Image: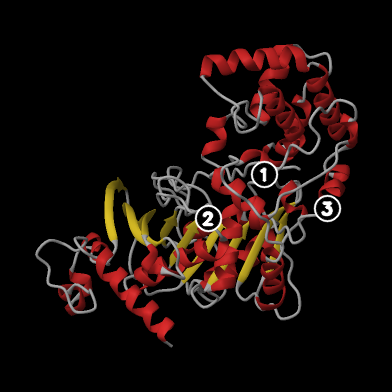
Amino acid sequence: MRKATRWLLSLAVLVGTVGTGTATAGAATAADGTDTATAANPRATDIKDRILAIPGMSLIEEKPVAGYRFFVLNYTQPIDHRRPWKGTFKQRFTLLHKSEDRPTVFYTSGYNVSTNASRSEPTQIIDGNQVSLEYRFFNPSRPDPADWKKLDIWQAASDQHRLYKALRRIYDQNWIATGGSKGGMTATYYRRFFPDDMDGTVAYVAPNDVNNKEDSAYDRFFRTVGTAECRNDLKAVERTALLRRGEMVKRYKDWADKEKATFNTVGSIDRAYEVLVTDLVFGFWQYQDASTACAKVPKPTASTDELWKWIDTIGGFDSYTDQGLEKYTPYYYQAGTQLGEPGYKYPHLKGLLRYPGINQSRTFVPRDIPMSFDKHAMRDIDRWVRHNAEEMMFVNGSYDPWSSEPFRLGKGAEDSYVFTVPGGNHGSNIAKLRAADRAKATARLLDWAGVEVAPGEQATPQAPYNKKLDKQETLRMPMLRP
């Protein structure tokens, strides 16, 4: 009881402290931290002032966006939600405000947040507001000093929960959680730990690595995806890239010297090149449109220039430089401590690999950051989704390697669905589903959001397409194969 009382008192101190100086100058403040003008007549106050009256909220900038108000903000969060008195950090997020009378989408990429306005697909479909949160430990939303043990899925879900509770007093209509790739995973974990916050969840191309030591699903995927001709061409180009290792690594070194790129984390430029080559087949199916890209795979007789350009397009020569890895350190840390990572075999490269086993998260995280894998974390998530999911939707792509280990529904799941885009890659979404699935997914999402569709009318997106706001984001996830 004493411990619980201490926690509540500390939380009260935290809320009072982070609220200092964030309210509009001259505004009276009630005992609970609420602006009294807002309490008396909330909607008479400008939305920016109402947001900034929330304790712990601060404005970075407001940008003009036609039809919306768009804010880039910081929200003060505890470093450790279990011990909020242990310090705070500022977590960046954006708010695309349409109206308090519309539902709100809580979007997470699982990485950095973009400070340019955009709408996720659910936001367009329900014609709502959008809150987009940067994941903890992605700069600049990183505590200083960084205690990496505080980077886990429960702490991140608690970040979302606390921000939701703060904004709920303004946006009191239905809420939908969404995200793609690691963002889809994040939206799912949030629902598991705080199942009553959201009215629905849409997770796109979200992998579910229940047993990190059992990855045969990826081997099956690469044996059967696409056409035999395309699969064989990809095997051949990977062999060619390693057979030409000498000339390619020399060119890679020239490029690195020019770009001032270094390879201390991976260990050497030769090691980085081998990882990059073993990534190629994964990256190809993850991002390329197989209907046109298969014909562009270089043949063994291709010139060095042609091979270089193709590898750079598919994998990116900056991917395993120190500079390319640094921004993704939080992801690799999570992959090696809770999320798990894909592994698959490459028998066609037998005799050509110098560093077998190098392609795994420990390679990509600086050695001064300790890592220990928790095998129970994903099993708990998987078990909860199978038996407790409500109002959840998973959208996968049949040509996306990350969909090899998808979320599945079992007994106990209610009003929840798994959809697959035929031939879809890591950019699969509701709009690319078959017509019947698309109609069903759209109807369920609108219902969860509390948006009524007139009887007899087909469920369709409520907001017209906007080429500036609705350009699909590349849901890029770093590629990991141990």
Packing grade of label 1 (10 A; few <14, some 14-19, many >=20) is many
Q: Sequence-wise, which precedes: disc 1 or disc 3?
A: 3
Return the residue found at the far left.
26
Residue displayed at 66% across by 56% down: 339
**Residue 459 in view in this figure:** no
Task: Please state which amino acid type lies under the numbered disc 2.
Answer: Glu
Q: Secondary structure at mark 3?
A: helix
**Residue 328 image position (x, y, % from top left):** 55, 42
Q: Residue at x 78, y 46 (%)?
A: 343
Q: Which percent across, then down, holds residue 421?
A: 71, 53
Q: Specify which label sits upstream in the sequence, 3 or 2.
A: 2
Which residue in the structure is indicated by mark 1?
A: 361
Q: Is residue 253 left or right of residue 42?
A: right
User: Would you identify the image quadrant in which residue 447 lies?
Assistant: bottom right
* The N terminus - image quarter: bottom left
The circle on residue 121 is 2
Q: Which mark is residue 217?
A: 3
Q: Residue at x 58, y 18 (%)?
A: 256
